[in-house]
Every structure is written in structure tokens, then in C-alpha cells.
Image (cartoon, coloured by chain):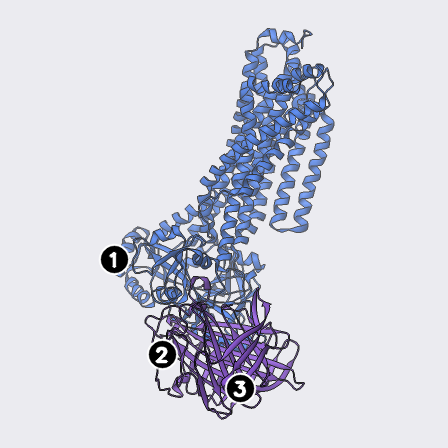
Chain colours: A purple, B blue
Amino acid sequence: MNVRAFFLFLMFPIASWAQGYAGLGGNAEGFARPESGYQFQFPKDHGPHPSYRIEWWYLTANLKDAEGNDYGVQWTLFRSALKPTESEGWQSPQIWMGHAAVTTSDTHYFAERLSRGGIGQAGVTAQPFEAWIDEWHMRGGDLTQLSLSASGSDFGYDLGLQAQGPLVFHGDRGYSVKSADGQASYYYSQPFYTVEGILHLPNQDIEVTGQGWLDREWSSQPLAEDQSGWDWFSLSFDNGDKLMAFRLRGERGDFTAATWIEADGQTTSLPDGSVLLTPLETNHVAQRDIPTRWQISLPEKGIDVVASALTPKAWMGTRFEYWEGPVTISGSHLGRGYLEMTGY
Amino acid sequence: MTRAAVQALLSHWRAHPLQLLTLLTGIALATCLWSAVQAINAEARASYERASAQLAIGQFDELRATGSMIPLSRYTELRRAGWQVAAVLEGALRVNGRSIRLMGVDMVAYPALPAIMQLEQSTNTPDPADMLTAPGRLLMSPKLSQVFQSADRFPPILTSGALPPDLILTDIGVAEQLLNRPNQISRLIILPDQPRKLPALSEIAPELQRIAPSSQLDTAQLTDSFLLNLTAFGLLSFAVGLFIVHGTVGLAFAQRRGTIRTLRALGLPMRNLIGIALGELLLLALIGGLLGLVLGYFLAGALLPDVASTLRGLYGAPIDGQMSLRPQWVAAGLAMATGGTLAASGQALWRLSRMPILAGPGLQAWGGGKISAWISGGFGFALIALGIIAYFTFGGLIAGFALLAGVLTGAALVLPLFISAVLDLLIQKARTPVTQWVLADMRAQLPGLSLALMALLLALAANIGVGTMVSSFRLTFTGWLDQRLTSELYVTAADETQAEAITEWLAPRTSAILPIRSTEIPHETGPLFLYGIVDHQSYRQNWPLIAKEPDVWDSVLNRGAILINEQLARRANLWPGDTVAITPDHILTISGVYSDYGNPTGQAIVSMPMLDRIVPDTETLRFGIRIAPEKATELAQALRAQFELSPTAVVQQAVMKARSLAIFEKTFVITSALNVLTLGVAGFAILTSLLTLWTQRLPQVAPVWALGLTRSKLAQLELLRSALLAALTACLALPLGLILAWVLLAVINVQAFGWRLPMHLFPGDWLALFLLTLIAATLAAAWPAWRLLRLPPADLLQVFANER
């Protein structure tokens, strides 16, 4: 999927990793590099790839309750390797980070978890599929049916997911280029989940239904040195078509890419410059200006829509801060989706 | 006019440089001792605060396993059930013969530590990959890193000034390898943010106990009492120092009465005069205060290493042996100096303001007399009563000090009344006119001398009280060591296998091998060390019990009873016949309480089988070995050679005793030093008071001289008078000192250290002190007496002239 890389670190402030957002622009010495023409193997590739520096299992969902109120849910497990190896116990150089959030029309709840691999506190197994950190989990026999759970001090959720379509691969059969210099990642998604379950909010439990989108991505250096952050969209239109689009902001110019996904899973990969992402309005969030209304146009597919944040407050005040929240779509098409913005 | 007046008044100090020196010394002494103690306290407190803030010690609830380590799998299970906990593995690391505490924390889950934050801000930010993966990094204070200079086989070192001395901080992955404790955890910290719903601890990890920070051993709290002791001494010295100031200022004003009269006759308003005097005092206070601060700083610097080692030895408290200069300390010291000086000079200033314009100098200098003695005496009795009431109403350490303050101050205030009553009695019995005159003269001088005598009283009482406490403690402690350390050799094995080999090897060579098995368990009263023992005469005959039931040893060894140490008994108010829950499943009857000095934590003894039941699989690594004393050294050497044991792994009883006594002596070295200083200051106060009185004595001595008493006779009487007053003061100081000793032993020590000591009396010491007091008082009077001896008769004659 997108370029939602993160990294870490822990107690070490981001400033000490001067290059790029959360150090993603740093060099990848000793780590494996994505190659074009890779043959994915499932279920193996649903599991972790410790020789790559970063990897994530990233699920977002747009949900509604019985009264028609909108909600957004995020469940993410990041893996970051200090070294391209794996070992037992505390000696493991694999660090795991979980982020969970529930967004309502006026409030954003989020929580964060950290662990290292090797001690069983966090990890991912491909067969049967399970991704977990502490008591949070995303598990199922394979990716078609998942149960999803997470909680923070003031919120939580228990959701069931059912895939209604095939996996889709971004870029060149899953090889997703991130810059003009050729930085790339492996990237595939399952954007066809139907979701139902319960959100636990401070005052009440709410039954919800909706749609979910899982992104799987791994790489060792997905950003070019001059790139400072990204804007990423996953949009589901009411007619069943979907669009994944991102813009990487760089000193030497922006880099965009998109994937058009039809209702039956057919994809069209759209190269740099095909999609136009234009911020229309900013909000002051967490001491900075964040664009919360965007114009998205893809003339090739007759798309000219405006995506507006359900609430501008969807700021993830975690160790690495970013904005991630649900959007509603209006214009040539109607629908809902998710927006992620980093590096502001 | 003002300028001239200032010059005239200041010229006094030029004429009397010694007096100036005395005054400045008084202020400096008062400030010095007080500030030194304050600096030491501040340093100690800052050290704890730094340590607990930096390592997040004592801030969170913790989970501990009774008597054992927590397996790593437990941590994972707790985490997977939602419990937000952070793992800590602790142990001692031996480096170049030194044992250093190693604290391994899960750097990924542990709360952000300032110690690491500080590293981050340095120029060489450590790479997280280096910190978390082999070989890892060791974080320590720059001073401690010197110990590692010649030691290889350790991971690279990062230094941080934010870390307490004697502690190494590292990632838990590094710690488990250095301590050779793979997959083990000492304790789990419960992090503040927990998810909204958590399963009960009893469902996931029933063997773990949740411990609140309040029942974790709080170093600051423990050492507070020790430092409060020092503070009390500092305050006492301050008070005694102010007596000197009072005496000197009184003398200076008395001697300048002539000048003052002249200035006023020339038209200088009283308000200006008071202003000048006040300014002069403030200036002197500042100079003296600064001098005192400099002295105090060096004194604190000299004492601090001892205090630090005492606190380390006694409580394991991490204290830096280094001083830092704090601005608020300087400000507080100067404020104390000026405030104290003004308070001590208040009387002199007030008297100056009330002086009739043409009053002659010193004819009836020190007014008041009997009435004021009654007032101050009444006040004193009230203070004593208040102290006693406070003690019985509130209890505890502060109440103990309130009792001390009340009784000491009260007794000081009662002193003039007491002496004047004794003198009245003596006058009635006196037969010769000279005796009667001497006694009446003494009574007349009493108001002027009473403050100095009060200082002497306090110093003497402190000396007797503290001396009695220290000597009682030494006597008890030495006897206790003899009882407690019965084995000739103590051996610590590296592991179970070596322990077995050692026992096998020793069996034919010794008369008995007493295994010492111990384990630390979390307890509601704080950490508790549980020991298992086997039946042996060494225990039955020697173990120091302070309270017991009949058949105590059979109860413990055969009927599952328990012995607890005095600290635990007093803290939890448990005594023989009570029961104590060592774990929820093991509630044991207490059959005895034993004294246990030099150890702040709770401790208990059960039979070996009982220990196995409470905490299965405890390792036995320590042994006491009984052997003929003369063979101990030889066997120790053989043991070391045979098993390649380090010198510290085989310790002889004698060495252990010496080490314990050394810690003990260090504990009281500060108290003794302050004690001697206080007494010196009090002697000085008497001298200054006598010198003050001297100027006013001529009109009283002259008539007696005119009646035929020679100057040498008068000088002798002068010495006698001083000695007699000191003797009377000492008589009152003795009971006061014993009360002080009792409060120290039965109240303060129990609160501060958790043990109560029997009080021993040392009449020999009192006699020595009594003689010392007489000598000091005679010496203090020697100078005025010598001046009287050398006084030209013309001066005495002048008293009868009109020129004065």
C-alpha cells in the first residue's frame, strides 16, 4: 500500500534520525532490497520478512451504527528490524509497534503498544494467520476471515471481517515504486472486507457494520533522501470501484502513484502524474496546519471528487506522529475512505 | 554628623580587634555548622531524588514472585492478557573485585528514563541497534566507568552524569547474559496506562504479588531520620553559636556607652544611632555569614564521604560523595546568619534605645534579676510540659524530636532559676562575709551569664546524651556481633554444584557445616529476607533474642514457628504469640524476636524444611563453618585454593566483625565530631560573657578591694565563681543528658533504624566530662582574672572618683 512506513525509535527522538520521516530515508545497508518481478507466495508472504527493515499489517475500516453515524477504525502492526536477522528472547533485533484508533465525528481515540520480537509478546504467523501485540490481535485461518481486537485505556473494539474479493497488487504486480530514483516496496492489499462488530467507547458499546481495507507492505528504504512525508488515500466508491492513491512530497518535486481497483478486483496501475491530489483547506491540529479537505482528480477514469475528513482531530499523537482518519467523498462519485498524512 | 558618628562607633572595633574577631567567629561558627549539615542533607536528598526519578524507582506498583525469579514466559502471558508491565532484571556484577548493582530494564517497554534522555541529547547519540542488540551498551556514571577501565569482557560503556553512583543501567537482554540468568525477571513494573478491561491477576499469574510503591523500601524515608538527627545537631550548634554573638554584642555596646553618651550629648538623635548600630550589625552578620558558609562548605565536603558511606552501608542508599554549591543554600545560610545575629543582638539594641541620655556606663548593667528569672523559668517549665504532651499525643519521630526540643530548651530556661535557688540556699548557710559576698555577687551576675550557662548546659547535655547512646550502642553491638557471628568461617559458593563439592570437601575437616539458605520475598511490610536454618547448638546457645516464648528453638525447628527480626517486629507490631502471613498460604506463629543491627530490612528465620515448603528450590550457596578458631585461617586459604574462590567468598569471622564495626564507627563519626564542636563553642560563649561582664564589674569589685581583699584573692575568687557556676550547670546537665540519651535510644533510634537498644550508664565518662567542664570554665575565667590581677590600683581607685 501506501508509504506508511514508520520508524521508530522508541525512546530515541526522531530528531536524531535526521533523514526523512521517522528515518525512513536512511540507508539500508545489510537489509534485503525489493526487486522487480518478485513472485509472491501465500500464505508465506502474509508472515513477516525479517531481512527487510520495515513491514506492516495495516487495517482501516469505515463503519456506521444503526442510526447512520460514521466511525473509522485503525489497527496497525509495524515491524522494524534493527538488524536483518531474527533471534530468540530479548536478543531479537526485531521491534514491533502497534497502533489502534477509533474515530467518531467529534473525537479520536488512539493507543500505542511496543514490543520486541523473540519473546512472543508480538509477532505474525502466516499459517494459521495471526498478527498480535500484547492482547491486540488480527487472526483467522487465512486472510479471508479475520477477527480483530484492540483496546486502549478509554476505548476498544471487537470486529469480524469477511473478504468479498481477491487480493490486489499495486505497482508492477506488487512491486510499488516510491520515487523517481527507484526506491520501492512490496505492496499488496485486501480492500474487499465487510466488517461487523462492536466499538467500546467510554459511555457505550456500539454495534457497527461497514467496509475494511488491509494493506501489506515491506521494504528496506521506501523513501528517497529528499522526500519528507506523504499523503495517502484509500477510497471506496458507492458503485464498488476503489482507488488507492499517494503523493510523496519531495524537495525535487512530488511523486504520485495510484491503483484503480474495479469491483471484481481488476486493477490498473497508474504511473507518476496520473492522479492529481490538491489540498483545499487546512485545519490547525497538534500545533501545525494539516490539509483536511482534498480534491482528487483522475481524468483517465472520470474521477473528480472532494475528500473531507470526518473530523480534523484524527491526529495520532504516538511516538511517531501522523494524521490518520476516515474521509467522506463527494463530487463526481460518492463514497468513503481513509486518509493518512505524515511529515507535517 | 552621621559620618562622624559612624567613624566614632566603628573605631571601637579598631581598638578591640580581638572582640571583632570573636564576634565574627561566633557568627561564622553558627552559620558554618548549620550550613554544613544543611549542605549534607541537601546533597543526600538530591542523590535519592535523582536516583528515583532517573530509574523510575518507587513510582509504580510492582509485581514480584515470592522468593523466586519470574520466568520470561510469565511476562509474555501477562502482556498477552493486556497487562501493561515492564520487565526488570537486577543483580550484582563483580568487576575487579567490586560488587556493583546491575539493573537491566526492557528498554522497549520501560518508561522513558531521564538517564537515557540525557544521553540522547549528547552529541554522540547511541544507535538503538547498539543498545538493544549484542553486545549492547552499559550506562553508568563517569566515576564508575573508571572501575571498568582495565576490565575487558564487558560491553562498551556509555557514561551519563544523571545516573547514581554504584549502578549500571542496561537493556534486559544484556543483563541476562552478564548475570547469567537467561529468561528470568526480577520484578515487573506496572505501567500507568492500562487497557480498559484487564483480567484479574489471580487468573493469569496467581503466584505474583502486587506491591504498592509505599511498601517498597523507600530509601529517602529511611534515611530521613538519619538526616533529621544531623539537622537537630546543626540547629543545636547554631543556637550555641548565637550565644557567642549575644555575649560579644552585649560587651561591645557596654564598652561603647561612653562614646554613645558623648554622641547623644552632641545632638545625634537616638533613631540615627539605632540605624547606625543596625547597619553595623548587618554588615558584620554578612561578613561572618560568608565566612561561615565557606567554612561550612569545606566542613560538609570533609564530612560528606563519611555520611555517604554510612548511608550506603546502612541503607544501600546511593549517595554521591561530591558536593555541589547550590544558590538557595548560600541564601539560606546568609539569612540564618543575619537573622540569628539580629535576634542575638536584640536585647543589646533594645537596651541601647531605652538608655537615658546621660546614663553612666555599666553601673547597673544587667537589670532584670529575679523577676525575669521567674518568667523565663515558668516559660521553661511550660516548654518541658509541651514537649512531653506532644510526645505522648503524637508519637513517632517528629514527636520524639519535639520532646527533645521541649525538654532541652525548657531546661535551659529553667537553669537561671535553678542556680539562683541553689545560691540562695548557699547564702543562708554561708558564715563568712567574703563567702556571702561571693555568692551574692554570683547571683547578681547571673542574668548576664545565664545565656552562656544555657549554652554550656545544652552542650553538656548533648555530650552526655549522645555519648551514652553511642557507647550503649557500641557495647550492645559488639556483644551482638559475638552472639550472631558464631561460625569461624563463612563461605559463599558460586552455584549449587560448587556448593555440593565444597560441603563434601569440608565435611571431614570441620566440626559442623551450617547451611545458610535465604531468599527474598515480597511482603506487605516491604522486602523480607527469609532464612532457613538447621538445628545446632550455635543457634540455641548464642542467637540474640530480645523477646521469646518458652521452648523457642523447639517451636521453630520442630513445630513450624518463625523468628522475626526486631525491625519487622516494630514496623508491623508483631511479637511472640502473634502470627505473620509470610505468603497468603503460610501463616506462622512467631515464637521469638531477635535483634538485628545494621540492616534496615525485615528478616525472618524458619527451619530448613519450612523454608522448602514456603519457597521450594531455594539454592543453598552460603555456609557457616564451625572449626577450632586457630585453624580458621589455614582452612580459609585451603578452601580458596581448592575451589578457586575469591577472597570475598571465604570470610573469616574476625574480618566480618571488623568490617561491621567499621560501618558502625562511621555511623557515629559525624555525631561525635559535632558533639566536640558544640562543647568548644559553649566554652567560648562563657569566655565572651565573662569578658562582657568584666567592664561592668569594676564598680562592684572596687569597694571589696578597698575593704582589703587583695587583687590576687579577687582573681582567685573570679576563677572559683566561674568553676562553681559551671559545676552547678553540669549538675543539671547530667539528668538532662540522660533524658536525651533515653529519647535517642528508645524513640529516635527505633524510628530511624528500627531497633531499640538497652541503655548503659557510664559514670566514668561523666566524671571526665565534669572535670573537663570545670577546666573549660576556669580557663574561660582565666583571662578576666589575669586582667584583674594586673589591674593598676589607680583604675580601681577611679571608681570612687567622679570621672566615670
Q: Residue at position x 70%, y 17% from top?
A: B264
From the top left corner, tell me how far across and down residue B351 is, in percent.
70, 24
- Quarter of the figure with residue A178: bottom left
The answer for how far apart the CA atoms under marks 2 and 3 are is: 33 Å
Q: For numbered disc 2, what is the local secondary structure?
A: loop
Counting other residues with Cα less than 10 Å from the Cα at mark 2, is it few (<14), some (14-19), or many (20 or more)? many
Same chain for the residues under marks 2 and 3 in the image: yes
The residue at which mark 3 appears reads as A302
Amino acid at pointer 1: Ala
Question: Is there a contact, CB below 8 Å, between mark 1 and mark 3?
Answer: no
Dot in front, 1 or 3? 3
- Number of numbered discs visible in the structure rendering: 3
Cβ–Cβ under 8 Å for marks 2 and 3: no
Comparing marks 2 and 3, which lies closer to the viewer? 3
Can the viewer see residue B431 in this picture?
Answer: no
The Cα–Cα distance between marks 1 and 3, rounded to whole angstroms, is 90 Å
Where residue A334 appears, x then y in whole percent? 59, 85
Q: The numbered mark 3 sits on a residue in which chain? A: A
Amino acid on which disc 3 is placed: Gly
Identified at 58% across, 24% down, the residue is B688
Nearer to us in this view, A276 or B380: A276
Q: Which amino acid does the dot numbered 2 rest on?
A: Pro
Q: Chain of mark 2?
A: A
Residue highlighted by disc 2:
A34
Give the residue number, with chain letter if any, for mark 1: B641
- In the rendered image, residues at marks 2 and 1 fall on the same chain: no
Is there any visible trace of residue B332 in the rendered image? yes
